[in-house]
Image (tube, helix red, strand yellow):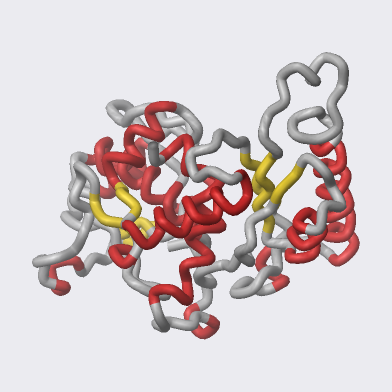
Amino acid sequence: MCGGVGDRLRGVLWSVRLAIATQRVILVSWHRPLELTNYFQPGEIDWTLEGIPKVSLDSKQRLGWLDSVPSAHMLASLQPDRVVWELEHNTLEDAPVAAGAPELPLWSDTAACLFQALFQPNELVMSAVEAEIASLYGNSQAPYSALHIRIGGLEGEGEASIQLSRMSKLNYFLESVSCLHDLSQTGIGGQDSQETAAVRQPAHLVVSDSNFLRNKIRKGVLPGLVAPSYTSTHLDTVHNSNVMVGGCISDWLSGWVGGFVPILKHYAL
């Protein structure tokens, strides 16, 4: 599957809808860099491969990036095969699948309900996330809003993977800085306007793969914004030769905290 935590989780949600449309069981094979069960356990839906012989999962049907475009023809072609592997589809998280599959806008209550039915973060992840929120807001249960800014080219992800020229990437970065500056001036945790002075809210939480932006925010350059102490990392790369597999569970915790903090309040209450 795709390399980032968010890409993979969105991909699983999409695959559930495909499984419903084709009347199949959803299973999740996630072992790079470590098994998913080191961080998440099944909720109401058991997606683990425990007890299933590997040979029984062999299949010639391996849907890639372009194959994932929903169509009646594609769905019909899957019917004769008992096992279908869905490999890449992170761009289609909101796409309709077929008649009989639920609508699932990514930030809807339906998506949150399905996420909770699939995944329950374990104590390691939750305690790290709560400790990070407490360090930023003084209370692990404090309300907050979160913004994710993706620049690309972070640790574990090659520069070429974002498919932007050097000048395009510079412009994208400058636009991101401008966006953060505007956000810091909105009165939400920043400089209060007359309209917002009476209703002051916690600072916006900004999660970014740019260490430059993260460090500037943590130094207070953009008042009204806070950033986590963790450096965001790309858990995996698409090309197997670049993948570092294994290591300690704690080695990869930053990727989970960085990826999970923005969606915690919506997806995992």
Q: Is residue 219 above or below residue 118?
A: below
Position of residue 192 in the picture relative to residue 119 (left or right) = right
Residue at 37 percent across and 74 percent down: it is 34
Q: Nearer the viewer, residue 121 or 9?
A: 121
Q: Is residue 34 visible?
A: yes
Q: Quadrant of the C terminus?
A: top left
Q: Looking at this view, name the residue that lies furthest to the front.
A: 138
Q: Residue at x 80, y 64 (%)?
A: 212
Picture coordinates of residue 237, whole percent (x, y): 54, 72
- Residue 132 drawn at (x, y percent): 55, 55
Q: Position of residue 181 (x, y in %)?
A: 86, 42
Q: Residue at x 75, y 34 (%)?
A: 189
Task: Specify the quadrant of the image occupied by residue 180.
Answer: top right
Q: State whether residue 93 appears in this view.
A: no
Above or below 18: residue 192: above
Q: In front: 156, or 196?
A: 196
Q: Quadrant of the N terminus?
A: bottom left
Left or right of 40: which side holds 71? right
Q: Quadrant of residue 99?
A: top left
Q: Residue at x 46, y 44 (%)?
A: 69
Disc count in the image? 0
Q: Is residue 185 left or right of residue 29?
A: right
Residue 53 drawn above or below residue 259: below
The spot of residue 118 in percent (x, y) is: 28, 45
